[in-house]
Image (cartoon, grey):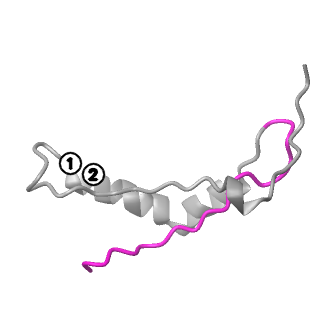
Amino acid sequence: MNLEPLVVGDPLFQRIMVSIVVDAKKVPRVDADGARAFERYLLAPVTQAQVRAFRYPDFDQQAWWPAGRHNNARE
């Protein structure tokens, strides 16, 4: 059975991903430095470009619209 997408650009189908660095004082054995490094990687322009350029096989339309930003209210 070959399935074909009927709707691909509707905002209702947004795929939102969030990274959160937890407080090492509240959660034992957290690698906060590693978590911050991973967050920097996700927010880097080159990573955002790779996410934007990703295509599923046999589906040559953009699947992800990266909107990475650092929005920590505490900093």
Q: Position of residue 37 (x, y in %)?
A: 33, 57
The residue at the point 26 percent across, 80 percent down is 75
Three-letter code, disc 2: Gly
The residue at the point 20 percent across, 48 percent down is 31
Quadrant of the frame with the N terminus = top right
Residue 56 appears left or right of 60: left
Q: Are marks 1 and 2 in contact (CB under 8 Å)?
A: yes
The residue at the point 13 percent across, 54 percent down is 24
Magenta segment: 57-75
Disc 1 and disc 2: Cα gap in Å?
A: 5 Å
Circle number at residue 8: none
User: Is most of the magenta stretch helix, strand or loop?
Assistant: loop
Mark 1 packing: few (<14 Cα in 10 Å), some, or many (20+)? some
Element marked by disc 1: loop
Element marked by disc 2: helix
The residue at the point 41 percent across, 73 percent down is 70
Three-letter code, disc 1: Asp
- Residue carrying label 1: 31
Residue furthest front as drawn: 12
Q: Toward the viewer: 29 or 2?
A: 2
- Residue carrying label 2: 34
- For residue 70: magenta? yes
